[in-house]
Structure formats: structure tokens, C-alpha cells
Image (cartoon, rainbow, N blue to C red):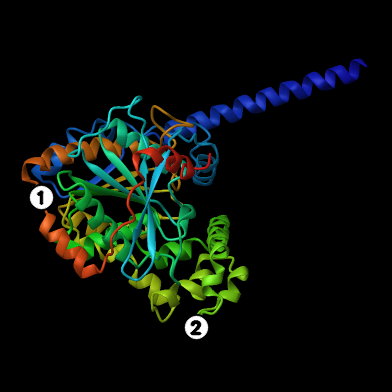
Amino acid sequence: MMQAAITSKFIAMAVALGSGLLTAIAWLDAKWKTQKPGLQYTPTEFHERVLRCCPTLHQPYRPVPFMTNPHVETILAAKTRRRPPLAYRREILMTGDGGCVALDWEHVQEQSCPPLPDHAPVLVLLPGLTGGSGDSYVLHAVASARRAGMRAVVFNGRGTADSPVLTQQFYSASFTGDTRAVIAHVARRFPRAPLLAAGWSLGANILLRYLGEEGAATPLSAAVSLCNPFNLPVSNENLTRGFNRLYDLNLAHSLQRIFRKHAPLWAAAPPPFRPAAVPDCHTIRAFDQAITIHSFGWPSVDDYYAGSSSCHSVPHVTVPTLCIQALDDPIAPRAAIPFAPLLANPHCLLVTTLTGGHLGWVAGEQAPFGAPWTDKVMFEWLTAVVAELQPQRQPAGKELARQEQEDGISAPVPAPAPAAAAAAAQASAPVH
């Protein structure tokens, strides 16, 4: 009995010592990786004035202990980050090809929160691959926008967040038609408001491609790109290595789930579509080979990735654009960041953090379970940019009307009547 008691005490002491040592190592690692964010930009008066209004960018980025490994941070942020209790009102926007996209506007009870004026900035949010309005990072951005006095709307890609699919087309890294339609529609709906956009991951890639294509014609006043894969051949190759293959598998299975909901649309699809191969697609590349490239007319996956990379769009961006990247991101790797083109474009500001993972950034006042560190940075920067640009802004109603006519955008489905707003919001509220 005495021997057993001594053994138990020894084990308890060893566990306590090991736990203490592990905690100390985690604390020291987080302290060592605490650094001010890297800032890269062409020195201009505009950048300097805006940065003076962004205190978070001048303070050290302090990762949470145990969250300095990119895989731990990426996975735990996705699984444990709290979801703000928000509700949405869904609007279906028909597109010129007979398809549609779902726009989720925050539904706010006027008793609990005063309505925003029509001239309040409007922020269009583009989630990542297979993501949507119910994801925690998107919900936090919507809530943060409201606190910053901005009206947020989530642009759900075709098939995501239970949005309808009416044609043999989802969305892709190369296709900017839906983005163009959404931005033009929102600008027409709020002609007095500064129009902003922010995208994460694939959504960031699509947003920058749109900005590069539109140039000075875009109605957007400013944009934010977060964890952008930029160079798709490099980023996809990175997904084939080591632990990263689990992200590739997980995203491929998410694509499969979306496809299964709409599989009848592809049942009679002629070659080269290969809908029967989708159940065996365990990588993003395999799914793109079976479906995506044929929907958008690419001869091969390699051509699709090379031609869809937003790194080529950076030189053509003409509005203030904030790009935030974690240097340890396993999905949007450091090797894919176009440092030189971003530095050469006077409209771009690149912010880098030593840690952050993918869609993680578990740091700041609300860490580890609240809003990511990037929310504060994004809204400090957007608020400052809007203040700087406000005197210069002019309505673009005629230009937007012309653009919508050229793009063949049909009328949107009307928003629910006030009596049905609560039911509509409940029906489209995110799953918690």
C-alpha cells in the first residue's frame, strides 16, 4: 500500500512538473513570437495619414500561448471560436446566366439597435472556399462592422451557405462575374454610401482579381484581402505536403457535400464534365479536374490555377487595399505572397504577422475565443480610409446602371416585407 501511494505521488509530481514545463515553454514561445506586424507599402501621405489612425498596427502582435503552431491555431480557431448570435435577412440576386447568388444582410431589431443611415458605409464580405455567412470569422466581421457604424452584407458563392444553384456552375477562383453583379447591385441600392469589400482566402483572391479587372471603374472605395493564396499553383502545391494534406482533404469533402445537394443538375452533363468522379475526389485539384474547369472553360487544372492567381492582378489595383497575411499560414503560404508587386503599387498596404495560421489570428482583446485580431485592424483601417476619401467621393449611379445593363444582370428578388422580416431572418439565420 505504501509503495502504491509513493508511486501515485511520484506520478502526480511528474505530471505537474511536465505540465508546468510545457506551460513555461508555450509561454516563452509566445513571448518570443510577439512582434510588431510587418508593414510594407510605398510611402505616401495617404498611407501615413491612415496608419496614424490604426493604433493596433503599431502595437506588438501577441499570440496566445499554445496557439503559436499554425496547425493548432488554424484548427482550434475554426472549432472553438464563439459565434456571435446574429440573424440574417436573405436576398436572392438573379444573374444574367440564369443563376443566382444569396446575399445575407444582418437583421437587426430596431428596438435593440438603432438603424444605420442610408449613407453609412456598406461592406461586402466574401468568405473563403466553401465558407459562408454562418462561419465564425464572418459572423464576427458582421458584428464588428455594426460596431464601426458600417452595414455588412455577406456574398455567399453559389451553393455555399445553402444558397440555390440553378445552373451547371458553382463558383471559381477565376470567375468575377457574380462579384461584379453583387457590387453593382449593392452600390445601386445604397448610392449615397461608401462601398467597401473584404474577402478571406479564395474570397480574397476573387476580390483582388475583380479589382484588377475593373481598375478605376470599380464603385468600391477600398478593399481588404485576408489570408489570400495569391499564387494558386504555389498554394495548391503546398497543400500536398505533410499535414497540409488534411486541409486539402477537408476542403475537398466540403466541395463534395455542396455538390451532392445539387447533383441532379449535373446528372445529364455532357463530357468533359465528370460528375460520376466527384465521390472519389479527395483533393481540391481532383474536384476542379472533374467539375470546375469545365464550368469555366479552362483546358486544364494547371491553366486554371495559373490564370486565376490574384498575384497577377495586384499591379492593376487602383483603390486603397489592405492585405493581411500570416507568414506561417499553411494554406496561403509565405512563398505565394507577391511582396514586390504589392510594394510597387502605391494603393496597397501589406501587413504580415509571424503567426496566425489560416483564418486564425488568435490574439488581441477577445482572444482566444472571440473575434480574430484582424477584425480590429480591418475596421481601424477602413474607418480611416473612409474618412480620408469621403470629401472625394461622388455618386456613380449612371455608371453603375450602365455596368449592370452590360453585365446582363436581372432584377433582384425583392426583400421580404416588414411583416415577414422576422420569419425570413429566422429561416436564414446561421447554424450555431
Residue occupied by mark 2: 272
The amino acid type found where label 1 is placed reads: Pro
- Return the mark for residue 52: none
From the top left corner, tell me how far across and down residue 74 is, in percent.
Answer: 50, 45
How many residues crowd around disc 1 within 10 Å: few (fewer than 14), some, or many (20 or more)? some
- Return the mark for residue 395: 1
Q: Check disc 1 and report its element: helix, strand or loop.
A: loop
From the top left corner, tell me how far across and down residue 415 is, in percent.
Answer: 33, 48
Q: Measuring 31% from the left and 37% from the top, which residue is drawn there?
A: 145
Task: Examine the rendering and report whether any part of residue 133 can be seen.
Answer: yes
Quadrant in which residue 84 is drawn: top left
Task: Examine the rendering and report whether any part of residue 349 can be seen.
Answer: no
Tell which tag, 2 or 1, sits nearer the viewer: 1
Above or below, comparing residue 298 to residue 104 in the picture: below
How many marks overall? 2
55 and 139: which one is in front? 139
Q: Check disc 2 and report its element: helix, strand or loop.
A: loop
From the top left corner, tell me how far across and down residue 281 is, in percent.
Answer: 58, 69
330 and 17: which one is in front? 330
Quadrant in which residue 274 is drawn: bottom right
Q: Earlier in the sequence, mark 2 or mark 1?
A: 2
